[in-house]
Image (cartoon, rainbow, N blue to C red):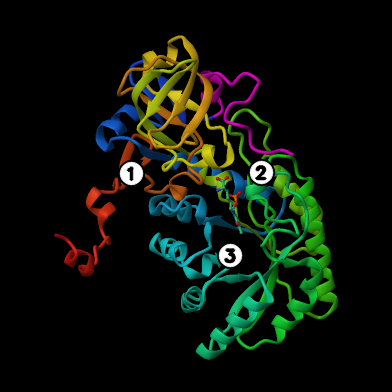
Amino acid sequence: MAAPLPIAPADPDPSFAELLAARPHLSMNALDGLMVEGVPLARIAAAAGTPTWVYSAGALRRRARALQAALVGDGLRAGIHYAVKANTSLAVLRVLAAEGLGADVVSEGELRAARAAGIPGSAIVFSGVGKTERELRLAIAEDIAQINIESAEEAAMLSAIAASLGRTARVALRVNPDVDARTHAKITTGRSENKFGVAIDDAPALYARIAGLPGLEPVGVATHIGSQITSGMAAYRAAYARLAELVEALWAAGLPVKHVDCGGGLGIPYRDEPAPMPEALAGAIKASLGRLNLPVMLEPGRWIAGPPGLLLASVVLQKQGADRRFLVLDAAMNDLVRPAMYEAWHGILPVGPVDFVSPVAPADVVGPVCETGDTFARGRALPSMTPGALVAFLDAGAYGAAMSSTYNMRPLAAEVLVDGTRFAVTRDRQSYEALLAGNRIPDWLEERSP
Ligand code: LLP
């Protein structure tokens, strides 16, 4: 199985220079150290402290454009709905909205974030296996482009709500094609045992039923087979081929299908693993769905937002253990949970120009949280570093800040957007007041106090 690479793989890691070469928005300046576009990370650390998420607007734009170009290049009529779950920063959303991307949302919070960033309802798609009545009402009120229905039960619920409001909701039916995306088990979604979508064999009957329900207008079919797909296009092709057959069956039954939502999932190279380019995905869509001659939708998250982001952290101390060296950072699993949760490998670069060229030796890179799982990397080749030295975790723009928590009562980290030679704090570091806010000690506990 092509699972994400473990945090301590057996073969040698790419060198710092190799990691940099593959990430054009990053560079090493002999005086200023590691830079994001035209801004030294040391300046950002001085202004915003650490840990801090740093996003490159230029890289976000380049990736949005590259994806659009790949789809257009294959003659596809395609709308990209960026999967907001990957990175919910309003500044990031605004950059992507300006590139003409819509949003794929999975909760009221994400819908509100997309709207707050200026994405119109007409460019928003709502996915998810458990949308609440309140969320569906909001989706209808915002007149969003499409609600992706994942069950017969949800269809009935949405129909009742829409009809009671005297509105019509445009819906797509998310089908589960039962293909194996060959990715990490925790992020595979297109197998029959997964909770997502309806079985493809049940789809024609349900689609017909939806067409007859008040308040619903079926407009298409959707699928999403998993995330961080790097094992080639076979799974995509198989899933889309099944969708194409489904669309033809629906048409034959006289049912309207106006477009196909192809989901997200395109993987990125975190280490040096081969990862498919958007052209390959466009080719798979064309090969399997091209004969339908329908507009398609895409819901990419990681491919757009992952590489443009990094997590900037400071060394708290370097500790010599019984048999290994530990680099203890001020960032932890509550900030970037991917290594702990999926054994994910993230590149780690020293930021200081001297650290960058100093001799390296294996070190375990850990956070201060009281769990052994709070380990970012094992045996990583890094220089000896003193307290306060900076490091950058690469490719942390997707499922980084978005998945962070306040575990161990650690405030949510700040976020910064870099654009050329400018940068701005786009989310303040959470204050300790905000961290404690909302907590209340009931009166009746006070009464028992001595
Ligand atoms: N559409 C739907 C319906 C999804 O569930 C997802 C991701 C996407 C689109 C975007 O997928 P992407 O293009 O980003 O692969 N936290 C995990 C990834 C979870 C993905 C969940 N669904 C990680 O850090 O690897």
- Image: magenta residue range: 1-22
Can residue 40 be spotted in the picture?
A: no
Identify the residue position indicated by label 2 in the image: 184
Give the quarter of the image for residue 239. bottom right
Residue 309, position as x, y percentages in the image = 46, 39
Q: Quadrant of the N terminus?
A: top right
Identify the residue position indicated by label 1 in the image: 410
Amino acid beneath label 2: His
> Which disc, if any, is residue 173?
none
Q: Main secondary structure of the magenta part?
A: loop
Label 3 – label 2 distance at C-alpha? 20 Å
Precedes in sequence: disc 3 or disc 1: 3
Identify the residue position indicated by label 3 in the image: 128
Q: Are marks 3 and 1 in contact (CB under 8 Å)?
A: no
Residue 198 left/right relative to 84: right
| Ligand 1 lies under 8 Å from the Cβ of mark 2 | yes
Label 2 – label 1 distance at C-alpha? 28 Å
Numbered disc total: 3
Precedes in sequence: disc 3 or disc 2: 3
Residue 51 left/right relative to 232: left
Precedes in sequence: disc 2 or disc 1: 2
**SS at mark 2?**
loop
Residue 143, position as x, y percentages in the image = 50, 76
Please name whichever residue, 334 or 425, is drawn nearer the observer in this view of the structure.
Answer: 334
**SS at mark 3?**
loop
Amino acid beneath label 3: Gly
For marks 3 and 1, give the one nearer the viewer: 1
| Ligand 1 lies under 8 Å from the Cβ of mark 3 | yes
Residue 431, position as x, y percentages in the image = 25, 48
Q: Residue at x 71, y 47 (%)?
A: 281
